[in-house]
Image (cartoon, rainbow, N blue to C red):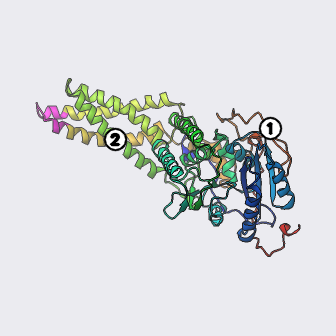
Amino acid sequence: MRTDSSPGTLPAREHLPAAPAGTPVLDVVIPVYNEEKDLRPCVRRLHAHLERTFPYAFRITIADNASTDTTPQVAGRLAAEIPEVTTFRLEQKGRGRALRAVWSASDAPVLAYMDVDLSTDLNALLPLVAPLISGHSDLAIGSRLARSSRVVRGPKREFISRAYNLILRGSLQARFSDAQCGFKAIRRDVAQVLLPLVEDTGWFFDTEMLVLAERAGLRIHEVPVDWVDDPDSTVHIVRTATDDLKGVWRVGRALATGSLPLDRIARPFGDDPRDRDIEDVPKGLARQLVGFCVVGALSTLFYLLLYSGFRLFTGSQIANALALLVSAVANTAANRRLTFGVRGRGGAVRHQGQGLVVFGIGLALTSGSLAALNAATSEPAHSTELAVLVAANLAATVLRFLLFRAWVFPDRREDDPAVRAAYEATPYEANPYEATLYEANPYEATPYADTPYDATPYGTAPFRAGAAADATWPDATPQLLPVRPHDSDSRDLR
């Protein structure tokens, strides 16, 4: 299944429309565990900042993560005092579990979270969520590792943070700079299809969410932040690092085997309607050409190395056939995954069989070239053989790309009248996930699927963690209307 043409892809990003004041546009979640001391000053400071600077209606949600001190009572009093503050009570620990539950139940189109210690300068909050409101980006993260960031923290945490991000870059090819900064935001329409794929319930939740979003081609906006580390942090560094490394291994293995249905959360190529009105130009052609050329260049080098090795103990025709066979299998597998975006094991045997047919055509071209060379001269030099093979392979490469694109990995969506009709009927508004969020989802058997939560969307009623993953998402997207601090709206009725 190709990433940029699956019927399950997200619709194009759009600027959130304007509408009546009072509808929360932003929901800021503060996960807490035994934070009776810091919770009240944190919430009051955040509320004052949002009320003074944020031009839309907002909500602050306290996610009480199974606290055993007086944190629930402090949260309840804050919710009673401040209309924009609500509280959720979870009976199990885990930052990821708390974010999944609250984000899944929220009706705000933009969802964010920050740590209770407010280590991040709040002036970065509006730049964080603005790209999501405008439709420019899907997720946004604060980065302490950007060049313009100003960070105050000890050398131990600095080393661990940079080492962890280097591990992500080396193992999962992550391109975002700071995975664990407690300052992130996501669009609700993205969260509803991305969160069911995220398994972790603890500190690795952020990293897993970002890696899957990036691999699916979603846009992640980074905001340099000023950060002052909390010296009283209760995070267990060694245990957290161990859990993170286990998560890196699990996600890396899932990506390598293609078991994640990332094509379901991909955006269409280009959000401008004109990008979808262009006719007679195959979608993704430029990207596929680049990928095919890179794979082809590497395959050619691999082939020449194999040919030179086989040639040491066999004739040129046998060496050519063996080298071409091995490199053809590797080439088909690489093009299947990297060039044409086909994931999973479905159809892999058929693709390899078709690839071998293409290999046969390449074998005929290269073998014919060698036969012609041997007919022209009885003992050709090894360098001459290689030059002839390179020329023959170039011709075979062009034919191989055309056959791969048109026959081995065709765009099935374009040939499906039902899918094409569905796309033409509602190209920008149809949401294939509104019927059922977990249909044909191999991750539906998550540890949260069996714990429904109480149907109290906002308030102080307790609910069970993770249950919101089974909730039905509202169809209508709340609309926006700029609200100035001196305007009269629902927040003034206190």
Decide which of 427, 458 is in the foreground and name it: 458
Q: Is residue 442 above or below residue 397?
A: above
Residue reaching furthest to the top:
313
Decide which of 57, 242 is in the foreground and name it: 242
Magenta residue span: 372-385
The amino acid type found where label 2 is placed reads Leu
Q: Quadrant of the C terminus?
A: bottom right
Q: Is residue 384 magenta?
A: yes
Residue named by callout 1: 452
Q: Position of residue 363 (x, y in %)?
A: 30, 31
Q: Quadrant of residue 462 in the image?
A: top right
> For the residues marked 2 and 1, what is the alpha-carbon distance in whole angstroms?
51 Å
Q: Under tag 2, what secondary structure?
A: helix
Whether residue 171 sits left or right of residue 31 in the image: it is left
Whether residue 413 sits left or right of residue 83 in the image: it is left
Residue named by callout 2: 298
Q: Position of residue 107 (x, y in %)?
A: 77, 54
Q: Residues within 10 Å of mark 1 (few under 14, many from 20)?
A: some
